[in-house]
Image: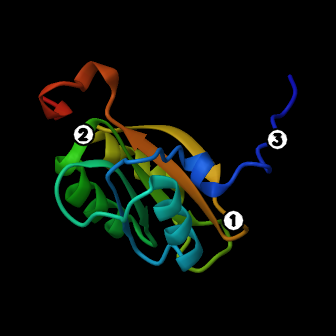
Amino acid sequence: MTDRDYSHRSVVQKLGVKPDERVEVAGDVGAELRRDLKEALGRGLVRSGDLDGAIVLVESLEEAEEAFERYRPRLRDTGYVWLLTRKRGQQGYVNQMLLVPPGKGRGLIDNKTCSVDELRSAIRFVVPRALRGGNGQPA
Protein backbone atom coordinates (compact mmCIF):
# COMPACT_ATOMS: atom_id res chain seq x y z
CA MET A 1 0.00 0.00 0.00
CA THR A 2 1.41 3.39 -0.94
CA ASP A 3 1.07 6.51 1.17
CA ARG A 4 -0.88 9.34 -0.37
CA ASP A 5 0.77 12.74 -0.58
CA TYR A 6 -1.57 15.57 0.37
CA SER A 7 1.13 18.25 0.60
CA HIS A 8 -0.15 19.94 -2.56
CA ARG A 9 -3.55 20.58 -0.96
CA SER A 10 -4.29 23.77 0.93
CA VAL A 11 -5.52 23.63 4.52
CA VAL A 12 -8.98 24.74 3.35
CA GLN A 13 -9.05 21.86 0.84
CA LYS A 14 -7.99 19.41 3.57
CA LEU A 15 -10.80 20.72 5.77
CA GLY A 16 -13.29 20.20 2.94
CA VAL A 17 -14.81 23.67 3.19
CA LYS A 18 -17.15 24.41 0.27
CA PRO A 19 -18.45 27.69 -1.19
CA ASP A 20 -21.48 29.27 0.49
CA GLU A 21 -21.30 27.10 3.62
CA ARG A 22 -22.16 28.70 6.94
CA VAL A 23 -18.94 28.34 8.95
CA GLU A 24 -17.98 29.76 12.33
CA VAL A 25 -14.37 29.98 13.50
CA ALA A 26 -13.28 30.28 17.13
CA GLY A 27 -9.90 30.62 18.76
CA ASP A 28 -6.60 31.81 17.37
CA VAL A 29 -6.57 29.82 14.12
CA GLY A 30 -4.46 32.52 12.47
CA ALA A 31 -5.25 35.41 10.14
CA GLU A 32 -4.11 33.47 7.07
CA LEU A 33 -6.51 30.56 7.68
CA ARG A 34 -9.39 32.96 8.40
CA ARG A 35 -8.66 34.81 5.14
CA ASP A 36 -8.39 31.58 3.14
CA LEU A 37 -11.67 30.30 4.61
CA LYS A 38 -13.53 33.49 3.68
CA GLU A 39 -12.08 33.32 0.17
CA ALA A 40 -13.12 29.67 -0.27
CA LEU A 41 -16.59 30.32 1.17
CA GLY A 42 -17.14 33.39 -0.98
CA ARG A 43 -18.68 35.02 2.09
CA GLY A 44 -17.85 36.06 5.62
CA LEU A 45 -17.73 33.80 8.64
CA VAL A 46 -20.91 33.55 10.74
CA ARG A 47 -21.47 34.05 14.46
CA SER A 48 -25.02 32.80 14.93
CA GLY A 49 -27.66 30.50 13.45
CA ASP A 50 -27.40 27.06 11.90
CA LEU A 51 -23.96 25.88 10.85
CA ASP A 52 -22.52 23.75 8.10
CA GLY A 53 -19.28 23.76 10.02
CA ALA A 54 -17.25 25.04 12.93
CA ILE A 55 -13.48 25.28 13.06
CA VAL A 56 -12.20 25.70 16.60
CA LEU A 57 -8.74 25.85 18.14
CA VAL A 58 -8.76 24.04 21.50
CA GLU A 59 -5.92 23.88 23.99
CA SER A 60 -7.53 21.73 26.68
CA LEU A 61 -10.10 18.98 27.07
CA GLU A 62 -12.36 21.52 28.80
CA GLU A 63 -12.18 23.86 25.79
CA ALA A 64 -13.09 20.94 23.51
CA GLU A 65 -16.08 20.05 25.66
CA GLU A 66 -17.20 23.70 25.59
CA ALA A 67 -16.88 23.71 21.79
CA PHE A 68 -19.03 20.58 21.47
CA GLU A 69 -21.59 22.12 23.83
CA ARG A 70 -21.65 25.40 21.88
CA TYR A 71 -21.68 24.08 18.32
CA ARG A 72 -23.51 20.74 18.41
CA PRO A 73 -27.03 22.24 18.82
CA ARG A 74 -26.44 24.56 15.84
CA LEU A 75 -24.90 21.94 13.56
CA ARG A 76 -26.85 20.79 10.52
CA ASP A 77 -27.10 17.02 10.12
CA THR A 78 -24.49 17.06 7.34
CA GLY A 79 -22.26 19.51 9.19
CA TYR A 80 -18.89 19.14 10.84
CA VAL A 81 -16.84 20.38 13.76
CA TRP A 82 -13.09 20.55 13.21
CA LEU A 83 -11.10 20.79 16.43
CA LEU A 84 -7.61 22.15 15.83
CA THR A 85 -5.05 21.10 18.41
CA ARG A 86 -1.36 21.74 18.95
CA LYS A 87 0.88 18.90 17.88
CA ARG A 88 2.71 16.75 20.43
CA GLY A 89 5.49 18.65 22.17
CA GLN A 90 3.78 22.04 21.73
CA GLN A 91 2.41 24.08 24.64
CA GLY A 92 -1.35 23.50 24.81
CA TYR A 93 -1.08 19.99 23.29
CA VAL A 94 -4.23 17.88 23.62
CA ASN A 95 -4.23 14.19 22.72
CA GLN A 96 -6.93 13.99 20.03
CA MET A 97 -8.00 10.52 21.17
CA LEU A 98 -9.21 12.13 24.42
CA LEU A 99 -11.61 14.25 22.35
CA VAL A 100 -13.49 11.25 20.94
CA PRO A 101 -15.56 10.29 24.04
CA PRO A 102 -16.97 13.80 24.67
CA GLY A 103 -17.82 14.08 20.97
CA LYS A 104 -19.56 10.72 21.01
CA GLY A 105 -21.49 11.78 24.11
CA ARG A 106 -22.98 14.59 22.04
CA GLY A 107 -23.91 12.39 19.10
CA LEU A 108 -20.79 13.05 17.01
CA ILE A 109 -18.17 10.69 15.65
CA ASP A 110 -14.64 11.42 14.51
CA ASN A 111 -14.00 10.48 10.91
CA LYS A 112 -10.93 12.35 9.68
CA THR A 113 -7.70 13.96 10.79
CA CYS A 114 -5.26 16.19 8.95
CA SER A 115 -2.18 18.29 9.45
CA VAL A 116 -2.86 22.03 9.45
CA ASP A 117 0.74 23.22 9.69
CA GLU A 118 3.99 22.39 11.51
CA LEU A 119 2.42 23.19 14.89
CA ARG A 120 -1.21 22.11 14.57
CA SER A 121 -3.37 19.23 13.41
CA ALA A 122 -7.14 18.83 13.23
CA ILE A 123 -9.76 16.17 13.91
CA ARG A 124 -13.23 16.26 12.34
CA PHE A 125 -16.45 15.27 14.06
CA VAL A 126 -19.71 14.66 12.20
CA VAL A 127 -23.22 13.43 12.89
CA PRO A 128 -23.39 9.68 12.13
CA ARG A 129 -25.74 8.84 9.25
CA ALA A 130 -27.91 6.78 11.60
CA LEU A 131 -28.60 9.87 13.72
CA ARG A 132 -29.33 12.32 10.89
CA GLY A 133 -32.81 13.77 10.80
CA GLY A 134 -34.37 15.30 13.88
CA ASN A 135 -31.15 17.19 14.78
CA GLY A 136 -29.25 13.90 15.25
CA GLN A 137 -29.26 14.04 19.04
CA PRO A 138 -28.59 10.70 20.73
CA ALA A 139 -31.56 9.11 22.46
For discs 2 and 1, the disc positioned in front in the rendered view: 2
Residue type at the position of mark 3: Asp
Q: Dot 2 surroundings within 10 Å: few (below 14), some, or many (20 or more)?
A: many
SS category of the residue bearing label 2? strand
First along the sequence among labels 3 and 1: 3
Q: Is residue 44 visible?
A: yes
Question: Number of callouts in the render?
Answer: 3
Q: Dot 3 surroundings within 10 Å: few (below 14), some, or many (20 or more)?
A: few
Determine which residue is flagged by label 2.
Answer: 76
Residue type at the position of mark 2: Arg
Q: Alpha carbon of mark 2 to alpha carbon of mark 1: how far? A: 28 Å
Q: Alpha carbon of mark 3 to alpha carbon of mark 1: how far? A: 15 Å
Image location of residue 127, percent across then percent down: 31, 34
Image location of residue 87, percent across then percent down: 64, 66
Residue occupying image coordinates x 79% and y 50%? 7
Residue type at the position of mark 1: Asp
Say if mark 2 contacts mark 3, CB within 8 Å.
no
Asked if residue 21 is positioned above or below residue 48 in the image, the reply reads: above
First along the sequence among labels 2 and 3: 3
Say if mark 3 contacts mark 1, CB within 8 Å.
no
SS category of the residue bearing label 3? loop
Q: Which mark is residue 117?
A: 1
In the picture, the quarter occupied by the N terminus is top right
Residue occupying image coordinates x 35% and y 64%? 45
Image location of residue 139, percent across then percent down: 12, 28
SS category of the residue bearing label 1? loop
Determine which residue is flagged by label 3.
Answer: 5
Q: Dot 1 surroundings within 10 Å: few (below 14), some, or many (20 or more)?
A: few
Instruction: Give left or right: position of 115 versus 62.
Output: right
